[in-house]
Every structure is written in structure tokens, then in C-alpha cells.
Image (cartoon, rainbow, N blue to C red):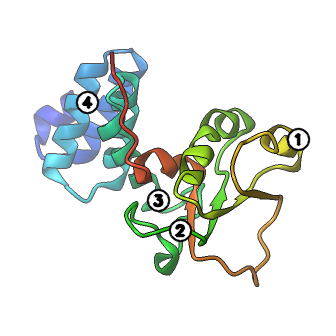
Amino acid sequence: NRAISINPKYAEAYNDLGNILRNQNKIDASIEAYQNAIKIKSDYIVSQFNLALPLLLKKQYNVGFKQYEWRLHGQGIEVTPPRKALYWDGCKNLIGKKFLVYEEQGLGDTIQFCRYIMKLGEFKPKIIFKAKKSLHGLLETLDCDLELIDHICPEMKVDFEAPLLSLPFLLKEKFDSS
């Protein structure tokens, strides 16, 4: 708070405050701190992404997953963003198209979010899912047109691609926050 009192336009201080408040489980206050950072510096990727976390904790899933997409824009990010020419906007027809989905975090997130592979399957693409080999036995039970791979070949031809944790946003999933 001292840094903010000295310089009320210090976006990084608001972001740090948001982190502290989120860690103290002061979720509403952390949202406000991140929003203040973004008001000062709208292209502040770290705060834009950090805002997603308390929103998701508050079960504000639609806006939270939209904010979560900011993880694809930062430096030193841990997930490969989809190539621009292969980005699916959630609207283009997928019937018969090859759609590469790739894991981006640990086994638990892959298991939790693989349900969106089946939702993607409702659009009738040929889904290629890059996941750890140790999960293939479980993932083979998904009820959709699915090919499982454990590495991406550079010569692989696909029409669209997305990281797994982008699917709730791209599918415009509607969540019941009750």
C-alpha cells in the first residue's frame, strides 16, 4: 500500500497487492486491485491474466475463462499459443476439419478438462489430442472421433489448433455459477 500511496499510477504495485489479497483469500479485494492495475495499464498482461484466477474462484467462469486467455500473450509463458493461421474463433465450421488440441499443464488439468474434447467433438471435427502417453488408456474412453498422440510431428497438417485449457472459452461454454 505504501508504494501505491507514493505513486497511485503504479500498476505493478496494484498487481502485487492483488496477488497478496488473493493469497489471503480476499477475493473481491484482489479483483479490485487487478482491475486498478489494468485501468492504469490496459496492456499489462500479467494483471490481465491474474484477474482470471479470482474470477474463476468466484465461479464467474465465462469472464474468468475469457481473462484466462491472456496467458497466451505473455513472455515466458508455459503454453504454446496457437499459430495465428490455425486459431479457431469458435465460429468457423469444423465438420471434417482436423483440430489439434494439446495439453498444457499437469495430469490433473488434462483429466479435468478432457470433457471439453467431447464438447468439441459435437462440432464433428477429426480431433488429434496430444497428451502424455500415460493418459492414453483413460482418454481412449472419450466418446468422439479422437486420435491420441504423445508428440507433435512438424509435418502434421491440421486446420485448427488450441491448448486444452482454451476450450471452455472457445466453445463459449455457458456455466451455471449457482
Residue 44 falls in which quadrant of the image? bottom left
Find disc 2 in the rendering and name its residue: 82
Residue mark closest to the camera, 2 vs 4: 2
Q: Are marks 3 and 1 in contact (CB under 8 Å)?
A: no
Q: Are marks 3 and 2 in contact (CB under 8 Å)?
A: yes
Residue 13: image x %, image y %?
26, 39
Q: Quadrant of the N terminus?
A: top left
Amino acid identity at mark 3: Leu
Find disc 3 in the rendering and name its residue: 72
Q: Nearer the viewer, residue 138 or 71?
A: 138
Amino acid identity at mark 1: Gly
Which comes sooner in the sequence, label 3 or label 2?
3
Q: Quadrant of the C terminus?
A: top left
Q: Which mark is residue 88?
A: none
Amino acid identity at mark 4: Ile
- Near mark 1 (Cα within 10 A), the count class, few <14, some 14-19 or many ≥20, is few
Q: For this view, does 79 lie left or right of residue 142? A: left
Which comes sooner in the sequence, label 3 or label 1?
3
- Near mark 2 (Cα within 10 A), the count class, few <14, some 14-19 or many ≥20, is some
- Near mark 4 (Cα within 10 A), the count class, few <14, some 14-19 or many ≥20, is many
Find disc 1 in the rendering and name its residue: 137
In the image, residue 115 sits, relative to residue 29, either above or below, namely below
Q: Secondary structure at mark 1?
A: helix
Q: Secondary structure at mark 2?
A: loop
Residue 146: image x %, image y %?
74, 56
Q: Nearer the viewer, residue 106 or 25?
A: 106
Which comes sooner in the sequence, label 4 or label 3?
4
- Near mark 3 (Cα within 10 A), the count class, few <14, some 14-19 or many ≥20, is some
